Amino acid sequence: MNPDLAQERRRATFDPEQVTSLLYRGPENVRKRRYLQNAAIQDQVLRGSKPWAFQSRIEQYETALQMYIYMMNKLDEMGVTDPLERMYYQEAGAPHYYNPMALHTGMFIPSIEKQGTKEQKERWLPMARSLQLIGTYAQTEMGHGTFIRGLETTATYDPSSQEFVLNSPTVTSMKFWPGGLGKTSNCCLVMAQLITHGKKRGIHLFFVQIRDLKTHRHMPGVESGDIGPKFGFNSNDNGYLKLSNVRIPRENMLMRYSKVLEDGTYVPPTNQRIGYGTMVFVRAHIVTNSARGLSKACVIAIRYSAVRRQTEVSPGGPEAQIIDYQTQQYKLFPLLATAYAMYFTGRYAEDYYEQIASEIEAGNLESLNQLHAVCAGLKAFSTWACTAGIETCRLCCGGHGYSHASGIPKLYTYYTPGCTYEGENNVMMLQVARFLMKIYPDIKRGGPIHEFVQYLGADLTQKSCMTEEVALGCLLKAFQHRAARLLSDAAARIENLVRSGKSRQEAWDASTVALTWAAKAYCHTFVVRTFSQIVSDAAVDKSTKDVLTALCKLYAIDGIIENLGEFIEDGFFSPHQVSFLKNKLADLLAEIRPNAVALVDAFDYPDKTLDSCLGRYDGQVYPALYEYAKNSPFNEQEVLDSYHKFIKPAQTEQSQRAPMARL
Ligand SMILES: CCCCCCCCCCCCCCCCCCCCCCCC(=O)SCCNC(=O)CCNC(=O)[C@H](O)C(C)(C)COP(=O)(O)OP(=O)(O)OC[C@H]1O[C@@H](n2cnc3c(N)ncnc32)[C@H](O)[C@@H]1OP(=O)(O)O
Ligand SMILES: Cc1cc2nc3c(=O)[nH]c(=O)nc-3n(C[C@H](O)[C@H](O)[C@H](O)COP(=O)(O)OP(=O)(O)OC[C@H]3O[C@@H](n4cnc5c(N)ncnc54)[C@H](O)[C@@H]3O)c2cc1C
């Protein structure tokens, strides 16, 4: 054990086990999580041969497939059915690979479960669970990802044969990006424009078999393939799909909410957006996923910062641990606080999703819009925070952060597409703004509205209650004030533009930056509120609560300092109050410092999950880096063939022109 890291753990003022328990919802869940992680870590088959980063793309794909299929079988044998528990096992078993069948379990099966009729579930789910059907969610096209009402793939109903005929009429209508579509899947749910009786009825999901179930060759009229290497996700065959007069039976349209009868009569759903449900479900889960990504980067960067020593503080004295530099703390500790904030908010988002989803199941769609706004906003807010945070962690590791040995570049390339997939973040924020603007008149009137948004009607002339002590309640009020004011500013801007003669749509289009500010501020407030609520309700001892409260305050204060203009432009904070905040920020960095390592230990990631030479629990960073470097295929030969092919001839040629000087 590295002595600095051992010392850090002795210095902690709280029991990390209590925090682990809070993060993973109780000691029983922690026990199960550890059991599954250990089972994966100890499994020889999952050890792998060659480090992930040294493999070709095809090798990465094949290794990922082999490992995930093995793990699916193992999980079935162990009787583990809960998706989260399955994920814990997989995360420890194959942390380096993005599962080529992720869309099968993450979107294909859930879509059938949520949007299929009883008969459709009976028909497809057993086959999907036994991998006879391997499916994906094929919505995005080359020409459209965001504006899904503009999708071009058509599904035209032919009453004479009671079939739908699917077509990709243009190059841009080709499905493009769906995970596992290229080579892995033999079927997919295709989002297509339904046409019956010659009329367009909007987009709907259709089950389409794209490959023969025995030979895996393409079905007639189907062309599909891999889209090529990407920034990350390279063990996944994100694919393209072109459909030419592909016929499927009427029963293959997912008909739980909307139907096409035998004669082609269209029965619309109660709410046209109910068919977007799978996206809402995934968005709710992306929040905790972002917390996972950012927390892993924090574990790596904070442990490494405790081990790494750089620069004599006084001439001839010992070099300081880099974690002792206040600037390093200012980069890392707010991110640590953000990771905790996102874990707690993710838990809230998942619980809220389950609550509203069961209301929807029971036929009550009243809260669908609000659920959509909450999930869209938190998905965007959390993925932005995660991606930016991972990059800061990488920079905090200096040169070694740039190596795959650190584990951070892979985290970055794995998490950054979260800002784009499942709804591009700016577009998601505009959906939040749309929801807020829609209820704004009710907010202003003081009409009955959900407690999430009540504060948005607050008196905007009020000033901050902040004192030198910097209470959490005052911090939350500051976020509420900022969100209310930015929303009011955006609304006022739209009204002014309308009064000046613009149409409502034109006024909206000319106000999307202001609307996005308002939506982000709303999401930020949501996170601060959730974090402070969970910390204040947490059943932990006083020393643990003190540490978590310090983290929560740091999250809030850092959020204010980073967006200071928005908090002071209307005079809400006085210059005096801003200096209280700045002083408190510095105090909190010092307060968190002795607990930083214990706070990352509390995330409880085994070394195998982190897959990082810098983030090892034992802090043996330097021997690990040396081992990793030795593994490079470059080092398999003392002299590479390329020396004889290129360098030697070049040297010979050069030396003929100018004879080599004696060394
Ligand atoms: C994977 C999860 C498994 C979970 C298992 C359980 C836990 C196990 C743990 C495992 C961890 C895994 C965690 C997650 C891992 C992440 C890995 C994921 C891998 C990658 C997957 C990527 C997949 C994809 O990207 S699929 C494609 C996604 N595409 C999009 O998101 C498209 C974005 N565009 C849209 O959503 C729409 O087009 C939109 C909203 C921009 C505009 O739509 P539209 O034009 O129809 O609407 P508007 O005119 O703007 O509004 C009209 C009206 O509709 C309301 N509305 C819009 N959307 C919705 C909705 N979704 N629901 C409800 N209502 C909606 C809107 O509010 C308006 O209402 P008004 O009342 O009229 O104002
Ligand atoms: C790794 C990865 C995996 C994916 N997996 C799947 C999958 O399994 N299945 C699937 O169907 N799709 C998948 N996708 C596709 C993904 O869902 C889309 O890329 C995403 O929805 C964004 O759409 P787009 O690419 O059309 O972006 P665009 O909409 O073209 O966005 C480009 C820019 O335009 C801006 N913009 C677009 N519209 C608006 C607007 N109305 N207002 C303001 N700004 C706007 C955006 O903010 C962005 O800056 C995946 C993508 C990636 C990267």
Image (spheres, rainbow, N blue to C red):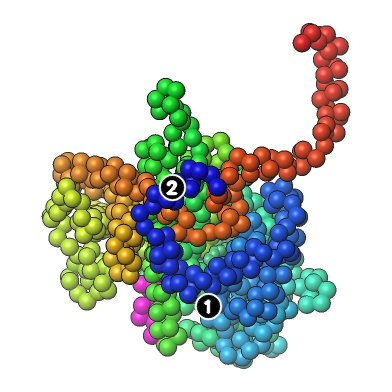
Q: Which of the image's four quarters has the C terminus?
A: top right
- Lateral position of residue 280 relative to residue 241, left or right: left
Q: Is residue 528 above or below residue 358?
A: above
The residue identified by callout 1 is 201
Which of marks 1 and 2 precedes in the sequence? 2
- Check disc 2 and report its element: helix, strand or loop: helix
Circles 2 and 1 in contact, beta carbons < 8 Å? no
Question: Who is closer to the viewer here, 104 or 595?
Answer: 595
Residue type highlighted by circle 1: Arg
Q: Whole-percent x and y of residue 526?
A: 32, 63
The amino acid type of the residue labelled 2 equals Glu
| Membership of 369 in magenta stretch | yes
The region drawn magenta spans 364-372
Mark 1 lies on a secondary structure that is strand
- Magenta residue check for 159: no
- Numbered circle sitting on residue 590: none
Asked if residue 581 can be seen in this view, the reply is: yes
